[in-house]
Image (cartoon, rainbow, N blue to C red):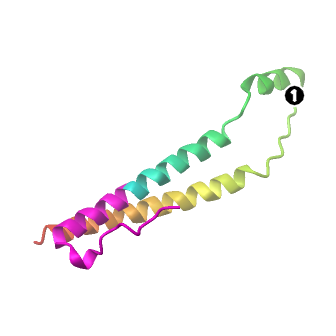
């Protein structure tokens, strides 16, 4: 768990400094989400391709019952949505830094 006790209050910081702190935090969250998505992708890959090949050679019908993959797909979709919203928030923050 993260400890924010040493984080300076945003009200006491210059606007530019607080915007940079927020942007850095958003980028950090996006990076963590991408790591989680890669872990989910790795978990969904078949563990042993040779077992699949040998099963294919011995039988013409293969049935795979997998109750985990739908949960991984759902989690990945949720993380993808979070990443998109965080990216949008980061863009809005940078737009507010450059007024028209």
Q: Who is closer to the viewer here, 1 or 33?
A: 1
> Farthest residue toward the left?
100
> Farthest residue toward the bottom?
11
| Position of 57 relative to 87 (above/below) | above
Find residue 100 and report its horizontal and vertical position in percent.
10, 72
Which of the 4 image quarters holds residue 45?
top right
| Callout 1 secondary element | loop
Q: What residue would you read off at disc 1? A: 60
Q: For mark 1, does the 10 Å Cα neighbourhood hold few (<14), some (14 to 19), or many (20 or more) residues? A: few
Query: Residue 15 vs residue 30: left or right?
Result: left
What is the magenta range?
1-27
Query: Residue 82 vs residue 69: left or right?
Result: left
The residue that appears at 39% across and 63% down in the rendered structure is 86
Find residue 40 and report its horizontal and vertical position in percent.
61, 47
The residue that appears at 87% across and 28% down in the rendered structure is 60
Find residue 32 and report its horizontal and vertical position in percent.
47, 52
Which of the 4 image quarters holds residue 5?
bottom left
The residue that appears at 84% across and 20% down in the rendered structure is 57
| Position of 17 relative to 70 (above/below) | below
Query: Residue 81 vs residue 16: left or right?
Result: right
């Amino acid at each position: 768990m993260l400890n924010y006790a040493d984080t300076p209050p945003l009200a006491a910081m210059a606007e530019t400094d607080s915007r940079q702190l927020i942007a850095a935090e958003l980028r950090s969250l996006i990076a963590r989400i991408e790591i989680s998505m890669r872990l989910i992708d790795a978990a969904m890959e078949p563990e042993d391709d040779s077992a699949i090949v040998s099963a294919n050679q011995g039988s013409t019908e293969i049935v795979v019952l997998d109750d985990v993959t739908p949960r991984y797909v759902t989690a990945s979709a949720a993380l993808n949505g979070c990443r998109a919203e965080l990216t949008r928030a980061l863009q809005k923050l940078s737009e507010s830094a450059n007024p028209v």
